Image (cartoon, rainbow, N blue to C red):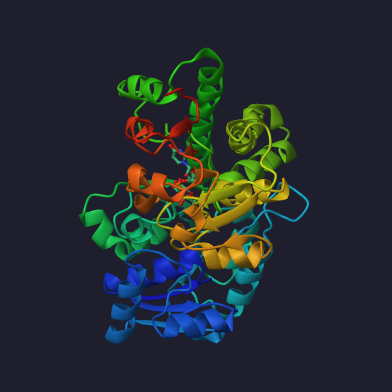
Amino acid sequence: MKISVIGCGYLGAVHAASLASVGHDVVGVDIDAAKVESLSNGRSPIYEPELPELLRAGLESGRLRFSADMSDVNGATVHFIAVGTPQRLGSSSADLTYVDQAFADLMPYLAEGDIVVGKSTVPVGTAQRHVGNVQERGAHLVWNPEFLREGFAVKDTIEPDRLVYGVADGDEYAVETLNEVYATAIEAGSPVIVSDFATAELVKVAANAFLATKISFINAMAEIAEVTGADVTKLADAIGHDKRIGRKFLNAGVGFGGGCLPKDIRAFTARAEELGRGESVAFLKEVDAINLRRRERVVELVTEELGGSVFQKKVAVLGLAFKPNSDDVRDSPALDVAVRLNGLGANVVATDPQAMQNSRRLHPQLVYGTTEEALADADAVVVVTEWPEYKELDPAEVHRVVRTPIVIDARNCLDADAWADAGWEYAGLGRQV
Ligand code: UGA
């Protein structure tokens, strides 16, 4: 099928390359000429495993191309809208400028029978605002949220856990067309859930709100564990054995970040308030507050471990990305901790396998270095992103290069006993060792 993808950021670039890999003819359109140029040369503007290979294969096959010219959507019959919906400056609601602009730019090229598919994460009610204009052109609108995780984006796109289509009045034609687009995933077993627009839009934010709540729940337990001497990791293992609860997303630590969970729960709260149902999701404000408290707690722990002040102490901050296998530092707890320690006068040397360039752009005042440079003569080591290379550090070897063997494991990802046995003062979150 001939498909266009409007917006070639995280979501759009992965979506375009994945659709080409399953045999469709795809053009990705973006207003950012530099991004288009980079993608056209097979260079991924983001760090995402498997994406560079997929891009190159798509470009070589001739089934994938990128353009900065909207008229290149001509000829495609299915148009995905995959632009960003960031948090509005100075507010907690979502900024829909890019979504509204993408619809407006696409309108002149829509032909009768075309399908417009919204993939962006939007406040409930957005599809309903646009459906009239799309239908006036004889085209169809579907809301088809995306659930990909950074670091697993290609896999999540090609083999999604589920596909959700929000359609107008049981629009059979739109459902059948999307089934063709996703034939490979459906044959491989991905279930399809067809709903109205509002449900489809809500599925996305409800899923992210649930995940964020699960993380903040275990982090709240960590706060209680800290004053009772309990161990939150054992608690998570124990409650996780209950199949109704499950162990996933119960890792206590410095909390969630990234371009989705934090902004989505805030935008959801703002939208619910607009709809007069603020009280229904008021708990999400608490979820957000617990999450932000964890960052402060890490800074507090470092300060306590250093005898009450971090001033002029060298602190090695291992990790800047919001999670491993990513170079994304949007709302990253790790970067936030580095910035706060630096602000308190610590001599921070921060490091990350992939996210230093993005961090430097946002916070040029921080000192960045290699893992070795960060660890050399450090008064304290803080692990804030659980990259495999940090989990695999040999505590005995690291002991030899630091000034004081103090480690703060802000992701509870290290083998606490091994570090303690090697002579380290180990501090985790929500656990005493
Ligand atoms: C999240 C959702 O998991 C995806 O399903 C969704 O499609 C995506 O947002 C989106 O809306 O686009 P992502 O932001 O890539 O995906 O990252 P997650 O793997 O969900 O992790 C989010 C944050 O939670 C990270 O900072 C991670 O370190 C933290 N986390 C996760 C914890 O602190 N504890 C856990 O147990 C799990």
- The spot of residue 429 in percent (x, y) is 50, 30
Q: Considering depth in this image, is 8 or 44 the residue closer to the camera?
A: 44
Residue 83 in sight here? no
Q: Horizontal placement of 205 versus 20: left or right?
A: right
- The spot of residue 163 in percent (x, y) is 37, 51
Residue 414 in sight here? yes
Q: Considering depth in this image, is 82 or 138 the residue closer to the camera?
A: 82
Write the residue at 59% across / 60% down. 131
Q: Picture quarter containing residue 360?
A: bottom right
Quadrant showing the N terminus: bottom left
Residue farthest to the top?
228
- Quick check: 300 above or below 153? above
Q: Picture quarter containing residue 344?
A: top right
- Quick check: 4 above or below 362? below
- The spot of residue 399 in percent (x, y) is 40, 44
Residue farthest to the right?
90
- Quick check: 117 above or below 235? below
Q: Considering depth in this image, is 33 or 380 the residue closer to the camera?
A: 380
Q: Horizontal placement of 2 versus 432: left or right?
A: left
Write the residue at 63% across / 49% down. 336
